[in-house]
Image: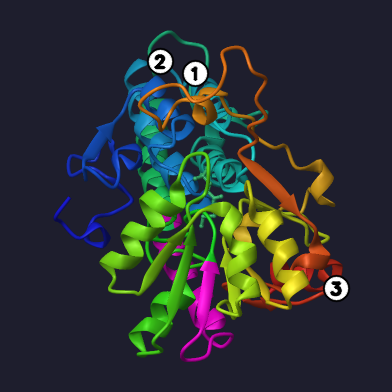
Amino acid sequence: MKENILNYPTVDLNEAGDAVLIIDQTLLPKKLEMIELKGAKELWDAIYLLKVRGAPAIGVFAAYALYVLSLEIAKQASTAKEFYEEFKKQKEYLNSARPTAVNLSWALERMERICEKGLSGAILPGAAKGSGTSSSGSPDDVGMIRETLSLLKEEAVSIHREDTETCRKIGEYGLGLIKPGYGILTHCNAGQLATSKYGTATAPIYLAHEKGYDLKVYADETRPLLQGARLTASELSAAGLDVTLLCDNMSGSLMRSGAVNAVFVGCDRVAMNGDVANKIGTSMVATLAKYYGVPFYVCAPTSTLDPSTKDGSLIRIEQRPASEITEMWYSERMAPEGISVYNPAFDVTDHDLVTAIITERGIAYPPYEESLPEMLER
Ligand code: MRU
């Protein structure tokens, strides 16, 4: 792979505007391939199979995916009501692809509100416009659907653009927590490949690098899907950072050596008490960081804060296939046939292990029951 991965969009609409364009992250780092997706099953699969991954990128992807599916729905639907019913089905289908990252449902909800706004003349109780029942669309319905499609496209583009701005701001707040010469440990990939640009956990690192801070970044390889080795190590070295890769079970010895001044990680869902769900292994890193007195920072856009989740025990953790552990990365199976496998994709880090949560609206410190609602209100 010779091209600089950072010059390619993680997620975008294709040039024709009728398919979602992504880097297929399952092929990295060996191959940099952009793929275009438009069918419901292939869009769902892209999320489930981690061709696109990372909470903010999944949100941006889902918004574009629902828009692309709406183009097809519009071709089939005879009335605005029919369009709306099918839109809701496709929205629920996409939402079922992965359960833990709240950005997926957050982006889809935003799209649904826009759809309802565009179709309000036909779907609200007592709506006057639109036939609603005829087998072919009335001129009102056709116009409403056309207008709704354009609103949906605008909303998806806004979600995409806002994500870039959000990550940049997280970077600016996080920069204040870094000093020149720092050693920084990160887990999984919360970089550009997990967002539209800059990443969340990597945004302060990129900004510090731009300022010439001379950092040393340590990337956990992140078993079982190796997001750290395949993605973080690739993108940070493409940006010219000094990156060192380590296995997940080596971060304790690295922290004990004094090489780590701070840990920065991303996040898939923040509960209102400050418990955070992130890639499996994060809670182990946080526990070690507390023991060794290393600050543990979680970077999360406010779209990852979930007002409906009181604490981490309520976060649904995705369980993944056993084959990811027993054979996926090996030339031959490495575990006995029939062995039981524990393979949660995420874990919950208790709030008392989290030094601060860096959002695009500022830095939240404990007690999180007070600081997180304040971030949501800002
Ligand atoms: O399974 P993944 O690769 O989607 O998991 C990604 C993570 O856990 C990231 O740390 C998180 O989504 C934050 S990305 C800015």
The residue sitting at 33% across, 29% down in the picture is: 71
The residue sitting at 49% across, 18% down in the picture is: 82
Residue behind label 2 places its C-beta within 8 angstroms of ligand 1:
no
Residue 82's disc number = 1
Label 3 belongs to which residue?
367
Determine whether label 2 and label 1 are within 8 Å by CB: yes
Q: Secondary structure at mark 3?
A: loop
Distance between the alpha carbons at the discs numbered 2 and 3: 53 Å
Which comes sooner in the sequence, label 2 or label 3? 2
Residue 163 on the magenta segment: yes
Residue mark closest to the camera, 2 vs 3: 3
Label 2 belongs to which residue?
78
Type of amino acid at the residue the image marks with label 3: Pro
Residue 50's quadrant in the figure? top left
Q: What percent of the width, then of the height, locates residue 241?
A: 34, 74
* Frontmost residue, 346 versus 38: 346
Q: Is residue 342 above or below residue 251?
A: above
First to last magenta residue range: 159-185
Q: Residues within 10 Å of mark 3 (few under 14, many from 20)?
A: few
Type of amino acid at the residue the image marks with label 1: Glu
